[in-house]
Image (cartoon, helix red, strand yellow):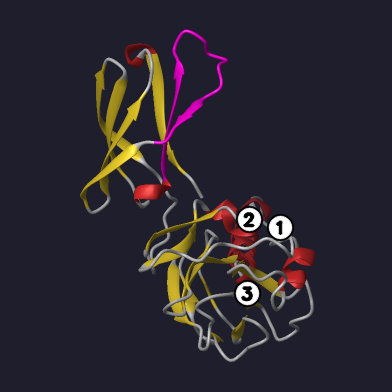
Amino acid sequence: MKPGATFFAAPLLLALAGALHADVSELRITEVNPATSQVEVTHTGAAGFTVASFLPFCHSFSYGSGIPAGTSFGPGESKTFTVSGLSATASDVWLYRDSNFASPGSIISGIKFGSSASLGRTSVAVAAGIWPSTSAFLPLPRAGESLQPFQLSDTTTANWFSGVANFGSFTAAEVRVTQIQVTPGSVQLEVTSPFTVTNHIVESRTNFVAAQTWQSHPPSVTPVAAGRFLLTVSVPEAGSRFFRVGATP
């Protein structure tokens, strides 16, 4: 063996291992609109791959829809699929790697929405650790909106929100303050936000007490344009406070 041969082979093997590791386990359901039966699936891995065999969606024991074999996902890419027959009022919807629907090892990602407890394969999702409990569910989205997680790590929780549809391009939900105006007893913040009027919350604490807990202030919200809002809150000592803006699930 020539000197240096091992040095060059090791990185090559590591690179191949990384490429081969990308698979269906890195797919996540990241948006659902029950009214239109649309479901977004996002690839969370750093390397692209092509689906080798049909990946079925399961909803209330229905299995006809899925991701076709040959579908390619790039790193971080989101694709939108239609789940035929998905209930608009209450259902579960899960993505599987194969047709072993009762196996926790086969279920990949999904949610339950609507107020009915333990629908469909929810107990399988709980056993797999991808859903918090059989009684957990997401409220239906508002008219014209869809269900979305705040960030990718929330896909295994019920911490989702109802927001403006964003199919085909998952981004973590953020609120950005673009302007602030402080007057005695009140504060007005201009924000860009993916959330609706009733989702917003403003919190504050005094800048003299670093360990102080944040205090919540339900704002008066005025829509300015698509994705832009004015949030007005009444607070004491407005000139001596830190403020932050967030959203309720």
Please, what is the three-letter code of the amino acid marked with disc 2? Thr
**Location of the N terminus (image quadrant):** bottom right
**In the figure, is residue 82 to the left or right of 97?**
left
Q: Residue 64's image quarter?
A: bottom right
**Residue 117 vertical placement versus 172 (above, below):** below
Query: For mark 1, what is the residue?
Result: 132
Q: Secondary structure at mark 3?
A: strand
How many numbered markers are drawn? 3
Which residue corresponds to the image point at 78% horizontal and 72% vertical from the top-left? 104
Query: For mark 2, what is the residue?
Result: 157
Q: Residue 125's image quarter?
A: bottom right
Which residue corresponds to the image point at 62% horizontal and 74% vertical from the top-left? 94
| Residue at mark 1 to residue at mark 3: CA–CA distance | 14 Å
Which residue corresponds to the image point at 59% horizontal and 83% vertical from the top-left? 52
Tell me the number on the disc at residue 151.
Answer: none
**Visible residue check, residue 144:** yes
| Residue at mark 1 to residue at mark 2: CA–CA distance | 6 Å
**Residue 142 vertical placement versus 175 (above, below):** below
Please identify, in this view, whether the residue under mark 1 or under mark 3 is nearer the observer.
Answer: 1
| Residue at mark 3 to residue at mark 2: CA–CA distance | 13 Å
Q: Which residue appears farthest toward the bottom when viewing the image? A: 64
Disc 1 or 2, which lies upstream in sequence? 1
Please, what is the three-letter code of the amino acid marked with disc 1? Pro
Per the image, is 198 magenta? no
Residue 59 placement (x, y as % from top left): 62, 81
The magenta segment: 200-218
Please name whichever residue, 169 or 236, is drawn nearer the observer in this view of the structure. Answer: 236
Query: For mark 3, what is the residue?
Result: 94
Q: Secondary structure at mark 1?
A: loop
Q: Are marks 1 and 2 in contact (CB under 8 Å)?
A: yes
